[in-house]
Image: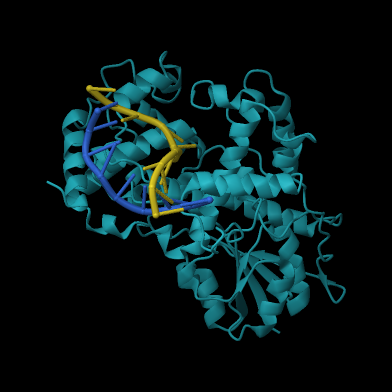
Chain colours: A cyan, B yellow, C blue
Amino acid sequence: MAAVSVMWFRRDLRVGDHPALAAAVEAGDVLPLFVVDPVLMERSGAPRAAHLHDCLLALRESTDGHLVVRHGDPTEIVPALAAETGAETVFVTRDHGPYGRRRDAEVADRLRSDDRKLRGVGCNYALEPGSVRKRDGDPYAVFTPFSRVWFDVLAGESYSVPGDVTAADGTCDGRPIAWTTVDGDDPPGRPDPGCELPPAGEAAALERWREYLVADGRGVRDYDQHRDDPAADATSHLSPHLKWGAIHPRRLLSDLHAGNGIRGDGPRTFASELAWRDFYADVLFQRPATAWSNLNPKMDTMRLDRDDAARELFQQWCDGRTGFPIVDAGMRQLLATGWMHNRVRMIVASFLVKDLHLPWQWGARHFLDHLVDGDLASNNHGWQWAAGTGTDAAPYFRVFNPTRQFERYDPDGDYVRRWVDDFDTDRYPDPMVDHAAERDEALARYKEVSGRS
DNA sequence: TAGAGGTTGGA
DNA sequence: CCAACCTCT
């Protein structure tokens, strides 16, 4: 009986990208099984399954052993799949980025443990991607109407949390499952920031959430007041936990609900961010190719820079030496911690797209390589938003001014000084571009695309 | 269907 | 004000 390889992996990777796994598949030692969170990549061409039950059925019917599962927590699905297939060995490969590696180890530990009352739900979103539709059955393309329906549906269910799921006991016919971690090399050119990582796992997620629920001033009650203040750092930091399925969005919504709706500007704004997360997952579910291609095909003709000079500009952006303090602070925070404040993500994204005229995919790739919460749907559609290629009909003339943003959102420079140690020295680089000139250039290029002169 | 509205801006 | 397009009901 072939072993089952469970890849908890970046959705745009293939088996061939992991030499050790590819060799095992080639030798017939491994039945490749793709466990993918949460939205599907079109290019996989594999059968779809939404729930554990469907997954097991689909696996029986899958002729080549390829299966793509839209699912939350591998600690639930892996033992069940192993039991179903009689696997003796389960391979867990790395996800991209620093957090994935830790996550793999944690998953392996939890699956090894004897006390295996596992918690999990079939979908890592408040509502299943693809389930919110217009009257005529079409998916929504704009956030606000989507979120109205989303809130209505969830309120109708009192923001309830799906029941706990007890997984299989992790043995196969009484034999324990052996665990092996494929030492999957990161694909070439994917640097490891080697940074300090936030605590992983369900307990850590719940602890942080409890803390954020009751915190005074910097908690969820004041989320709307301080969410754009990167120095205050008053956001929840739950994104890695949500991304990796350590906590479920319904848990958060249920706790915010308190029996009579979600009250208060902070909690409501926070909940609507969860709606954004569901929205982008839905968009990617409906249009899987938009992971790396423009949602708006008109933008395909946009003039972008990709030559050697552009690559050098890109490298300066990656390294955080653009000469724009708020941009450099964000990029350095990303490298140092695997995380960046959301307001700053928007600023650095706008800078890459509108000041440097580079493809948004370059920035999205760099983010996914380094973010501990890097999620294909939220990340890449966030980038499409910044680039004006996505769902939001953002006016093309909306160009972030990095200097103005610095003044507005980090007026005392606390955030910048925290991450840019040479900020107050003469070693700090001059601005790499003239923002006013590049803004005009970006507007000119957008006008070419829109066909006006 | 006509009319309202659209995350995050800049000057 | 920019400039003026989709989306949605």
Residue reaching furthest top? A412
Q: Is residue A448 above or below residue A23?
A: above
Q: Is residue A78 above or below residue A280?
A: below
Left or right of residue A198: residue A81: right
Please identify the quarter of the rendering in which residue A207 is found. Answer: top right
Residue displayed at 35% across by 42% down:
A394
Residue reaching furthest left? A453
Residue A154 visible within the image: yes
Quadrant location of the N terminus of chain A? bottom right
Total numbered badges shown on the rendered structure: 0
Residue A355: image x %, image y %?
24, 37
Q: Is residue B7 above or below residue A48?
A: above
Q: Nearer the viewer, residue A65 or A248?
A: A248
Please identify the quarter of the rendering in which residue A56 is found. Answer: bottom right
Residue displayed at 35% across by 57% down:
A294
Residue displayed at 45% across by 21% down:
A415
Please identify the quarter of the rendering in which residue A86 is found. Answer: bottom right
Residue C2: image x %, image y %?
22, 33
Residue A195: image x %, image y %?
52, 39
Q: Nearer the viewer, residue A141 or A174?
A: A141
Residue A12 visible within the image: no
Q: Nearer the viewer, residue A245 or A204?
A: A245
Left or right of residue A428: residue A227: right
Residue A230: image x %, image y %?
48, 25
